[in-house]
Image (spheres, grey):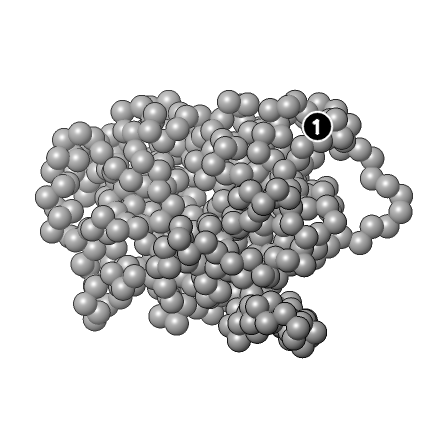
Amino acid sequence: MRDAAELTDIEPDDATVDPRAKINYDDCNVGDYVIIKGENEDGEEEDWFGQARDDKAPRDAIDALETRARETDGDPRACAQIKAKVAQNELATVKFLQKCENLEEFIDEFPDAEESDITDMYQWWQGYGTENVSPDTFKELGPNIFHRARRSGLGDTGKKRYFCRASTCMGRCNVEAGLKRKAPATATVKLEVDVDLEPKKKVSDLLLIPKDAVEWEPNVMAECRSTDVDNYPFEYATMREQAGETEKHPRDLKSACYCHGIRGLRKDHTDDVHALHGGVCPALAILRGMVIHLFYVKEVPNKGYGIFARERISKGAYLFEYVGEIITRAEASRREEQYMANGQFFLVDIQGQRNSPSYMAYTMDMTRKGNLARMLNHGCTPNVRLVEARVDEALLSGVQSKFRSASRMCCIAIEDIEVGEELCIDYVPVKKGGSMRKTVQCDCGSSDCRGWIF
């Protein structure tokens, strides 16, 4: 890797980079992972990896650049480049990751590990702290390019925290295979401050899952791929879609808490709310499309597939969002007839805000595309409830206008959910047993079972 002092002077290759696709400072959010266009020691193009940090350090970097500009008056080109960066005042603070290449050292620390355990596994770059980089050198930016390694012993090792590249991990780092940590040193070690959006889990409190489990998205594991789900395969999606367009994440999310900006979840947005989610703000999780808690999807007798909690989840916790295709009520009516004939029940009406143009206008269709919420089974005594939440307009910078009018459909725990317990929701909570059409029989097994789902 090139000397860190040179990072801020890297210029993109204008011949190969489309200016319309360039990433700028406003696109950078705290905790996002980045792939940077860099060079190796031989001057060959090389991808560098890192994580965007808080936005306080760039001011110090600007001061340093101003000093360097004054000191390089003898080099007009260098001075011009530096002054241009100063004028932009848009440097992103990045902490770099390096690939775990020393297998022997890794095995020494984790005796039960195998070579496959560190395929595309990374750790903090040894010898480098945070550096200030021009975002116009970023090739990719997003919250899910990497994730913290969640396998026993890998996720909490002080300054040697390990990360997996999501595109190649396939859930390996989430398998509990008995990796052993060395006994901690007796000397007190001051841990670095870290932007960590994944709360720490105690392995002893987790539901163990098979080694061949696959990852649908960070914190969501399953018996098979979504496209291999028996009878009703689907394409997994983490963001909503409408008219063939995928919703974009909001920009400018540089705060650790946005509880004030989402209406409909809870009124008492205090530190206690964050505590339900391991210290993570649930509103931030909604805005960034994150799943905070750990879940496992597996086949359930007489039900197809269901969602099970891999950890204990407290009553009142935000679980995940309903993600699918936003369609009009008229289109939903046209599709419903065919879906019912196929035994597919993945349409959810979005009520919307009363007296607004979007009131009773939209339906969420998860039949062809959807996320974890698609696997929620019906239960006559549910432990999950669907709540509509509205995001303040001020937080929707960068989100296409077509997505702003449809409320977000959030799943909330209405009971304490124990490790290994299935998550269930009442498909028709407004109806009692006597008013059912009695077209689909219920197999929820509850003592209060109505006997029918519809």
Residue sitting at x 27%, y 64%: 401
Q: Quadrant of residue 389?
A: bottom left
Q: Is residue 364 above or below residue 228?
A: below
Q: Is residue 331 above or below residue 257?
A: above
Foreground pick, 90 / 321:
90
Residue sitting at x 15%, y 52%: 329
Q: Is residue 314 visible?
A: no
Q: Amino acid at mark 1?
A: Leu
Q: Is residue 211 above or below residue 444?
A: above
Residue 44 image offset from top left, x and y in percent = 55, 42
Quadrant occupied by the C terminus:
top left
Residue holding disc 1: 103
Q: Quadrant of residue 94?
A: bottom right
Residue 343 image offset from top left, x and y in percent = 20, 30
How many numbered tags mark residues here? 1
Foreground pick, 331 / 425:
331
Foreground pick, 20 / 337:
20
Residue sitting at x 30%, y 50%: 246
Work out which residue is located at the far right of the displayed protein and give it.
186
Foreground pick, 439 / 413:
413
Q: Is residue 198 left or right of residue 338?
A: right
